[in-house]
Image (cartoon, rainbow, N blue to C red):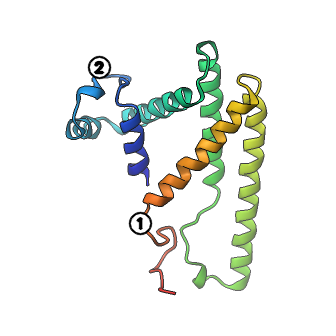
Amino acid sequence: MKKILFTLFIIYGFGLNAQKTDYDWKKMDPKQRKEVINNLSPEERKTLLAKFRNNMVMDNLDIEASDKAEFTQLYNEYLDNQKQIKSQFNSNFNPETLSDDEAKAKLQQSFEVGQKLLDNRKKYADKMQEVIPCQKVLKLFQSEGMMRDKMNERKPHGNHNAAGPKQAP
């Protein structure tokens, strides 16, 4: 999934320059872009991906130039917090191998993590509204959902997070 997301951001942001490079992404064919990206360090790739993601969000929301820095900081903070919260739940397990008590505990943990994600989203929606209009915050969350749906459409069918093979119905 990370590769697909990364490729989407690269395709969208190919007109942008990497932090330490002066590549003209528009003039490069996909093979050249892939080669350049593969030669970047993991940290450079992460920085490039974040830059493409941020630019895509800024363009999509049509953020005023005077608000871009503050919004970018808030948005990155929001994403970092969401990632940190998600890391509290390990979804790499096979539910069929859990005892009833273990399954109940795992289910409860998933609800708690979900609530933390929602609370964080509400917190940052309020903060973002101090920088951009409510309509743009709503559009941001809407586009996150659409992006997630697109990524899920491209995923191979089956649960790759669960340990063990998926059984046919």
Q: Check if mark 1's residue and mark 2's residue have beta carbons within 8 Å.
A: no
Q: Where's residue 163, x and y in %?
A: 49, 75
Secondary structure state at the residue bearing disc 2: loop
Q: Where's residue 82, x and y in %?
A: 64, 45
Residue 83 seen in the figure: no
Q: Amino acid at mark 2?
A: Asp
Say whether residue 85 is left or right of residue 27.
right
Question: Residue at the location (40% across, 35% down)?
Answer: 12
Question: Which of the labelled discs sits on residue 108, or is there none?
Answer: none
**Compared to 152, does 60 lie above or below?**
above
Work out how far the residue at label 1 is from the one at label 2, CA to CA, in angstroms: 35 Å
**Compared to 80, does 145 lie above or below?**
below
Q: Where's residue 150, x and y in %?
A: 49, 53
Question: Residue at the location (61% across, 22% down)?
Answer: 63
Question: Residue at the location (55% across, 77% down)?
Answer: 94
Residue 123 seen in the figure: yes
Q: Circle 1 sits on which residue? A: 156
* Location of residue 104 by image quarter: bottom right
Q: Circle 2 sits on which residue? A: 22
Of the residues tagged 1 and 2, which is closer to the observer?
Answer: 1
Say whether residue 97 is left or right of residue 127.
left
Secondary structure state at the residue bearing disc 1: loop
Q: Where's residue 28, x and y in %?
A: 23, 30
Farthest top residue in view: 66
The mark nearer the N terminus, 1 or 2, is 2
Q: Amino acid at mark 1?
A: Pro
